[in-house]
Image (tube, helix red, strand yellow):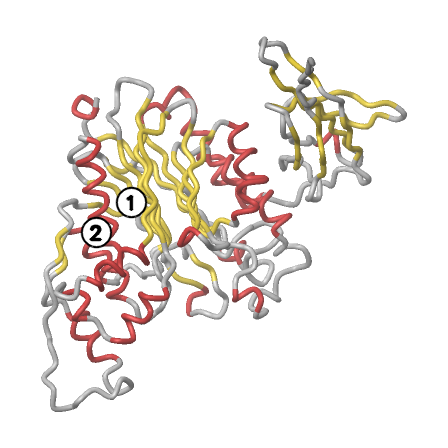
Amino acid sequence: MEFVCERNRPVIDLIHIKQNVIQGFAVQPLVNKSFADSVYFRWSVEQGDTWQVVSEQESFVPTSDCVGKRLKVEAVPVSTTETGELDIGRRVALELAEGVQAAPDLSVFKDRWRHVANTNKDGERDNFLRVMSYNLLADGTPAQRAGEYDYCESGAMEISYRKQLLTWELIQYDADVICLQEVTPHAYKTYMEPVMRQTGWTGVFCNKNFNAQMACAVFFKTSKYDLYMEENVDLHSEWQALKDARSHSVSSLVSDTLRLELDRANTVAQIVALTPKNDQESPFFVVNTHLMGSPTARLGRVIQVAAVMRRLRIAMTDCGLFDAPTVFSGDFNASPDEPVHQLLSTGRFSRKHKVWAETQSLFAEAENRNSNKKQTQEGVDVNTEIVFHRGASTAQRTYIDRRLDKGGAVVDFIYFSRNHFKLQNEHFPDFAPSDLFADTSIPSRRFGSDHVAIVQDLVWSNRSEAA
């Protein structure tokens, strides 16, 4: 008896586009395939009764010539046989029902894009590291479900629109390293990552608490860096380990209320080490985090940063990269005067700092503590061994909320190790308040988040030592 084994042919099961197609914003098809190693794409623009081929990339950015015209995308599944031959499956085409929409007015970014153009000329970009940090406002947060963003104009809060606007903005900044917080996982996997990959960036992704619909991500330029290592730090687990060590003084000194808030926190940090592809710079570390947001958790944020720094030192030791250059950025949920900044900028946090006593006494009455019990006024010394410098100060609010005094707060920061980097003289231009509040507040059709991106250009302090 003889048997003939036939390989399943590659096939496209589904192709669709879940976004309004807008001039200047990448269109990314969603494709489900079976038995295929890869998919070849072809994009065409409607020209009367015919179609004109305009691209063979996975995603396509419509130009002004495409406005009002329909697009068609074709997908061909391909697999490789055991003999190395290509097995090409059936072509599947999708014609969009509506034409390309005109781009929104994005002139509010003109000063920033002028700055990018000026620093990209004459090879100047080879002399510094551009770092960007941006809280993207995840989709479907409790605040959104509670109606706190009902002031937004129609369609501005839809993730199908915001993911396009935000990804477009990321690309325009042309940063070497991009640190993102509040990333919507589905939007990242189906749109942001493939578009950024095609445009020249590699992404590293981490879900909050590894099981949430709010994530962090780091992108880096594929042409300039290789990924040396990555580690995701679950700050909830770090706190649980600290609390389980019953003899540890930190866990025994915080209030019951703060302890409960730390128990509930699902924050994470990413530790990424990158190796430059040239010979001028050494491997360096990038830390990206989104700290707990409770206004009463000032000490909690110190504890979380101390935990991240401990894991960073372990990662450096494991990699044999002692005292490596480091960038530490993210949404700290902490104004510039909070104690967490003292820890980062000095490498130390004193047991005599008032926040220890403040934290212990803040909820004493609510927790029905014995009034005759003497309160501990001192905490413990915390040392991180790395001293950071904070990026250029700015009057720009990084979190915009029309209900707050001054319309927002400064809570997003980029820190860098003092021994390895120094600041470029110029910083990115701020947005005018009239732009941020032109549509009542942000998010809007021009701003995809309730935060604004912060960008910092860093120069290696000593290129010969860093090489």
Looking at the image, residue 213 sits to the left or right of residue 94; the answer is: left
Residue 28 or residue 148, whichever sits in front: 28
Residue closer to the observer: 341 or 55: 55
Numbered disc 2: secondary structure: helix
In the picture, measured across the screen, residue 345 lies left or right of residue 450, that is left
The answer to whether 122 appears left or right of 461 in the picture is right
The image quadrant that residue 140 belongs to is bottom right
In percent of width and height, residue 281 lies at 26, 24
Q: Residue at x 43, y 36 (%)?
A: 219
Report the residue marked by disc 1.
Answer: 328
| Residue 298 visible in the snapshot | yes
Residue 376 percent location from the top left of the image: 11, 76
- Spatial distance from mark 1 to mark 2, Cα to Cα? 9 Å
Q: Quadrant of residue 98?
A: top right
Question: Mark 1 and 2 residues: CB-CB less than 8 Å, in contact?
Answer: yes
Residue found at the far front of this picture:
1
The numbered mark, 1 or 2, whose residue comes first in the sequence reads 1
Q: In the rendered view of the protein, which quadrant contains the N terminus?
A: top right
- Residue at figure coordinates x 34%, y 57% from the top left: 291
Pick whichever, 101 or 279, lies toward us: 279
Q: Position of residue 91 (x, y in %)?
A: 76, 23
Give the class, few, some or many, for how many residues have Cα within 10 Å of label 2's Cα (few <14, many ≥20).
many
Label 1's element? strand
Horizontal side of residue 414 vs 148, given as left or right: left
Estimate how packed mark 1 is, as few (under 14), some (14 to 19) or many (20 or more) residues with alpha carbons within 10 Å. many
User: Taking the image as drawn, is residue 430 in sight?
Assistant: no
Label 2 is placed on what type of residue? Leu
Q: Amino acid at mark 1?
A: Phe
Residue 388 sits above or below residue 285 on the image:
below
In the picture of the structure, the residue carrying the numbered disc 2 is 344
